[in-house]
Image (cartoon, rainbow, N blue to C red):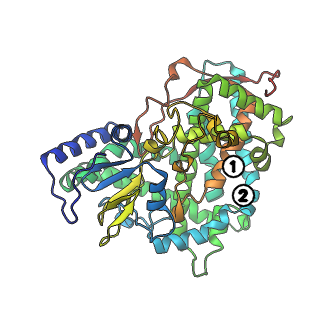
Amino acid sequence: MLLFQLVEGSRLLSWQTAGILFLLTIAQLQGQLDFQTRRFHQKYGSIVRISPNELTFTTAEAWKDIYGHGHAEYPKFFPEGFRPGDNGRKADIISSNAHDHFRFRRAMLPAFSDRALAQQEPIIREYVDLLIQKLGEVAAKDSSSTNMVKWYTYTTFDLIGDLAFGESFDGLKSGKENAWISSIEKMMKLFPILILATSSRILAKLLLYLAGDKIKNSQANHLRMVEGLATKRMQNKDQEHRGDFMDFMMRSQGQEHGLSNGELMANSDTLIVAGSETTATLLCGVTYYLLSTPDAWDKCVAEVRNAFSRAEDISFQSASAQLPYMLACLDEALRLFPPVPSVLFRQTPQHQAVTIDGMVVPPNTCVGVHHMAAYHSPANFHDPMTFHPERWLPSAREDEKSPFYNDKREAHKPFSLGPRNCIGRNLAYHEMRIILANVLWHYDMKLDSTCEGWAETQKTFALWEKPPLLVHIAARNKKTPRLS
C-alpha cells in the first residue's frame, strides 16, 4: 500500500510528498489522473494515499464503510471556492448538507416512483422514436459514418429537458447542440483551470483574476437560462399533473419538506446534467464495446430481435423482463466505462478516527472509492480489462466452474451506495434499455476503423472527454440468427 505516515493534526509536506502532488496535478491537467490512480492501486493494493489528506479505496467493504448506512453520514468534500453557496448558487441534491439532502430527496422521490415512470414513458418514447427516425435518415443516405456520441447526447438531453422543464431542447429535431451541451463542453475546456485553482490559494487568486470574468459570465448566463425555463414551466397551468420532474417536485411546496422556487430551479438544472450526460456516456460505451466484441454483438442483437416482432412492443416493462443479456451488456459497460470514472470524496469526522476497510483513518481525512480503479481491479474481477457480459448473468454467480464465479460484484456501485445513492437509478436503467433495444432492433452497425481503441484512449476531467464515436449504420438484415 502507498501509505505515507498519517499523523492526526499534522499536514506538513515533505519534498517527496510535494513532488508527488506536483506530478498528480500535471496528471489532472492532462486528463490522466484517473488512469494514474488505477495504476497506483494495481501496484500498491486496495488502499492508496494519493495526497497528504486523501485516501482512495477499491473494495466492497470500503463502499459500505464510507457511503453506506449504519453510521453518521460523512459529509462531501468541496475545495475552497467550490462549496455550496459560492458564487450565489443554491445547494442542490448533490451538494447539499445531510439535513437539506433528506428534505430534497423526500420531495423528489415521487418523481422517480413506479407510478411516475409509467407517466413519463410516453414522453421518453417520443424522443426514442425521433432518434430512430433520424438514424434512419442517416442510414438512407449511405454516408460513410455518423457520430453516435452526438445522437445519444441529443436524445438524453432532449428527453430529460422535457421531463424537467416541460419542453424539448430540440437537439434531435435540429441536429444541433443545445445550450446545456454547449455549457458542459465549455466547462470541460475550463476544467484544467479549475483543477489548478483548487490546488493552491495563490494559483486560485491568479487564475480567477485572469479567467474569473469568463467563468462568472458563463455561469451567470447558464443560471439565467435555468431561471427562465423553470419559471415558465412553474407558471404553465396546462402542464399540471403531467407527471414530469417539476410536477412532482412542485407538489411538495407548502409541506415541511417542500422546495423553494430557487431550490426547484437548482435541482432541475442538476437533474438535467446528471440524468443526461451520464446516460449518453453509458450508451456510447456499450455501443463501442458491442461493436468491438462480435460475439457479444451477435448475441445481444439476436436477443432483441427475437424477443420482439414489432419495435412498438419494446417498453420499459418488456425490455426489463425479456432482455437479460442486453442488461448484462449494459452492466459490463458500466464497469469498464463508468460514466463517473473518478472518486466522490467524503470527509471523516473532525474529531474521531474511523475504520475503513480494516484500516484506522484519522479525523478530517478525505476518503472515497475510486470507480475506475475498483472496477478494473483484478482483485475484484476476472480478466477485468475485457468486455465479458457473461459475468453478470445468473449462471456466473451459480456455477462454481465459471471463471467469473468469484467476481466481487458488490465492489461495482456506479450509482453509489447508501442515503446518497443515485435517485434516478431506475429511470436511467429504463432509458438505457429502451434506447439501446430500439437501436439494435432497427439497425445493423459497424465501428469505423478510426475509432478502434475509442474507450481506452480517452482523457477524463471528472467526466469522459468522449471524442466522436463514428459508426456505419444500415437498415437491419431481416435474417436475424436465433439465439443458441
Q: Is residue 37 left or right of residue 236?
A: left
Q: Residue at x 73, y 41 (%)?
A: 324
Q: Is residue 170 left or right of residue 27?
A: right
- Circle 1 packing at 10 Å, graded few (<14), some (14-19), many (20+), is some
Q: Amino acid at mark 1?
A: His
Q: Residue at x 56, y 41 (%)?
A: 406
Number of labelled discs? 2
Say if 373 sits above or below 288 in the image: below
State the residue position of label 1: 430
Q: Amino acid at mark 2?
A: Leu
Q: Earlier in the sequence, mark 2 or mark 1?
A: 2
Q: Nearer the viewer, residue 356 or 291?
A: 356
- Circle 2 packing at 10 Å, graded few (<14), some (14-19), many (20+), is many
Q: Residue furthest left?
A: 15
Q: Secondary structure at mark 2?
A: helix
Q: Are marks 2 and 1 in contact (CB under 8 Å)?
A: yes
Q: Residue at x 46, y 30 (%)?
A: 456
For the residues labelled 2 and 1, the Cα–Cα distance comes to 9 Å
Q: Which mark is residue 232?
A: none
**Placement of the C terminus among the 4 image quadrants:** top right
- Is residue 402 visible in the rendered image? The answer is yes
Q: Residue furthest front?
A: 400
State the residue position of label 2: 117
Q: Where residue 77 sits in the image (x, y, percent)?
A: 36, 61
Q: Residue 362 is drawn in which quadrant?
A: bottom left
Q: Nearer the viewer, residue 411 or 343?
A: 411
Q: Is residue 269 left or right of residue 211?
A: right
Q: Secondary structure at mark 1?
A: helix
Q: Where residue 174 sits in the image (x, y, percent)?
A: 62, 38
